[in-house]
Image (spheres, helix red, strand yellow):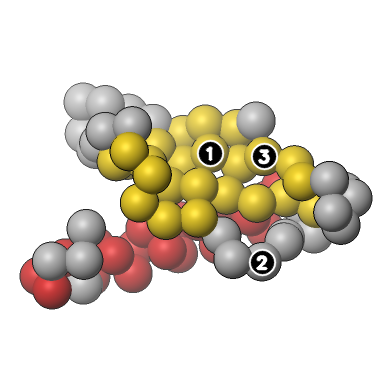
């Protein structure tokens, strides 16, 4: 499982983990201060693609932060 966090600059953590169905695919979860805020809704073929998708989700949320989503 991959984790990305720098608690000094952001409260967000991205977790990348393998899934069993379909085998060999990956999912991601974004946590803010340890609380789950978003999870991938589809499998990703590689860990790198799952991470890229998670980073895009974080960027989207930061652009829409004024809407109060997170």
- Report the Cα–Cα distance between label 1 and label 3: 6 Å
Q: For the point 65% across and 51% down, which residue is it?
A: 27
> Of residues 34 and 49, which is closer to you in this image?
34
Q: Position of residue 12 (x, y in %)?
A: 32, 40
Quarter-wise, where is residue 22 in the image? bottom right
Circle 2 sits on which residue?
A: 42
Q: For the point 77% across and 46% down, which residue is it?
A: 19
Ranked by sequence position, the earlier of labels 2 and 1 is 1
Circle 3 sits on which residue?
A: 17
Quarter-wise, where is residue 34 in the image? top left
Label 2, residues with CA under 10 Å away: few <14, some 14-19, many ≥20: few
In screen coordinates, is 41 left or right of 44? left
Residue lying at the far right of the rendered structure: 23
In screen coordinates, is 34 left or right of 43? left
Q: Disc 1 on helix, strand or loop?
A: strand
Point out the image quarter for the N terminus. Answer: top right
- Report the Cα–Cα distance between label 2 and label 3: 13 Å
Are the residues flagged by discs 1 and 3 in contact, CB closer than 8 Å?
A: yes
In screen coordinates, is 43 left or right of 52? right
Q: Disc 3 on helix, strand or loop?
A: strand
Circle 1 sits on which residue?
A: 15
Are the residues flagged by discs 2 and 3 in contact, CB closer than 8 Å?
A: no
Are the residues flagged by discs 2 and 1 in contact, CB closer than 8 Å?
A: no
In the rendered view, would you say 56 is above or below 14?
A: below
> Of residues 39 and 52, which is closer to you in this image?
39
Q: For the point 53% across and 39% down, which residue is it?
A: 15
In screen coordinates, is 27 left or right of 5? right
Q: Position of residue 39 (x, y in %)?
A: 50, 55
Q: Position of residue 9 (x, y in %)?
A: 21, 34
């Amino acid at each position: 499982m991959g984790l990305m966090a720098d608690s000094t600059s952001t409260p967000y953590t991205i977790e990348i983990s393998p899934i069993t169905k379909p085998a060999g695919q990956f999912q991601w979860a974004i946590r803010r201060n340890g609380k789950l805020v978003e999870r991938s809704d589809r499998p990703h073929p590689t860990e790198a693609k799952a991470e890229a998708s998670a980073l895009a989700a974080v960027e989207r949320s930061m652009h829409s932060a004024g809407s109060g989503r997170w």
